Amino acid sequence: MAMGRRKRRIRQKELWIPAGELPRSAGHPFYQRLSELLDEHGFDAFVEGLCAKFYAPTMGRPSLTPGIYFRGLLIGYFEGIDSERGIAWRIEDSLSLRRFLAIDLDERPPDHSTISRTRRLIDVETHRAVFTWALRLLAREGLLEGGTIGVDATTLEADAAMRTLVRRDTGEGYEEYLRRLALESGIETPTRAQLAKIDKQRKNKASNADWTHPYDPDARVTKMKDGRTHLAHKAEHAVNLETGAVVAVTLQGADEGDTTTIEQTLVEAAEQLEAAADEPDGVEEKVGGIGEVIADKGYHSNRVLTDLKELGIRSYISEPEHGRRNWKGKGKERAAVYGNRRRIGGARGKRLMRLRGERVERTFAHCYETGGMRRLYLRGRQNILKRLLIHVGAFNLSLALRKALGAGTPRGLAEAQNSLQPLAEPFWAVLAAVGVWLGLPCRPQPAQDPVAAIPRPIAPLACAA
């Protein structure tokens, strides 16, 4: 058989195409339900009211509407896209996402530069207000409670390379600095081996007090979870252990200790819970303040435990091995440490510790591993925090979608459908046999709405007598 070859034919395109003949997507069931959820709670009107002050009232170049901007960042979480350039490419390539953003085929989707410019235009507080809006939605759905809060932090790799570090005092690069040290030691033309030897003998060779990055000064040199040394940022979550919702997210220096950063995170969590409870219909009765704090041993210190006790918050913080301690003149610290030790040794303390490991670590996995934010492509703490607030807000929205659909992401919905598909045919066969035995011929009723075809609940039967 001879191989056929594709012949390229140049055709004259139609000058006018009726709008009714343009191809239309049926829409993705997940994004269709997400759009219904956002529309039901007035998302677009809310963000347009928030962002009105950032736009010219009467004139100016055509801009990216706030609803499309924030929905685009939500897509970044649900699709696991790490960069704004990737979000723009994905929107341009998908008819379902165009429908989710209400962008027609004759309209050009936003490119990455437009998304970046809009992010720089809108301040951090507006992004935080959108995060609070998602928490209020969870409160209305009964998925947010106060009381027990778990706190933990993780490192995010910065968009900065170690080889481009410069000295804070002189502005020298790393290799330039080593050559100066070699010259001061009497080596006029050092080789690479000699530079490596000089570098090996130095102590604190990458101290944050001496080195910084010229384009991302907020990034800090730190050791990552896998043992590598990188420039990174530190993201800290406060999670409601009853429901798994993230009530606060902060971005801080990667070189700051957990006992220092927990203060800002708990203050942010208390403010967010108070804002979420400021809703009608009795929501304030369901969403309370912080009553208990659960954390690992990195957060254990006399100051933290004493401050929590003075605020009336019970602490369940793992205690590291200190050995015998001297409590002379430290009565308050002693009472706080012994009370925390007694609580974590009880049955409730052990259960909360297990729950913290499950619920808090799950937020890191969803937001930064499958969510695609472990490696950052933005610089500057303010820019990163803007993206982070909407990213984690999308995770909170996924909890409401999981309650309605049984899946919190498009991939999870597809996997649920695939897992139930082998059971569908035997199920309908058994129902048909029962109907024949009863003399009632039954047939499955076809779903008119693609959202109704999701695996739960299964489409109803239409039985004729």
Image: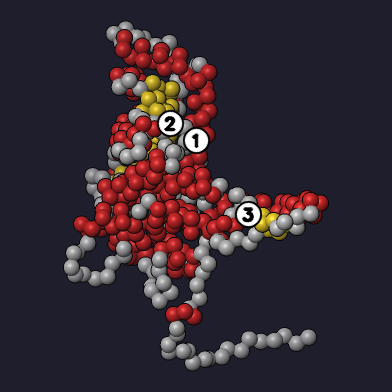
Mark 3 or mark 2: whose residue is earlier in sequence:
2
Mark 3 or mark 1: whose residue is earlier in sequence:
1
Q: Nearer the viewer, residue 150 or 376?
A: 150
Q: Residue at x 51, y 30 (%)?
A: 355
Residue position for label 3: 459
Where is residue 268? Give x, y as percent: 31, 36
Q: Which mark is residue 150?
A: 2
- Amino acid type of the residue tagged 2 in the rendering: Gly
Q: Quadrant of residue 199?
A: top left
Where is residue 398? Give x, y as percent: 47, 47
**Mark 1 nearby-residue class (10 Å; few <14, some 14–19, many ≥20):** some
Q: Secondary structure at mark 2?
A: strand
- Amino acid type of the residue tagged 1 in the rendering: Arg
Q: Nearer the viewer, residue 80 or 232?
A: 80
Is residue 392 in view?
A: no
Most distant residue in the front direction: 465
Q: Quadrant of residue 153?
A: top left
Q: Residue at x 57, y 57 (%)?
A: 452
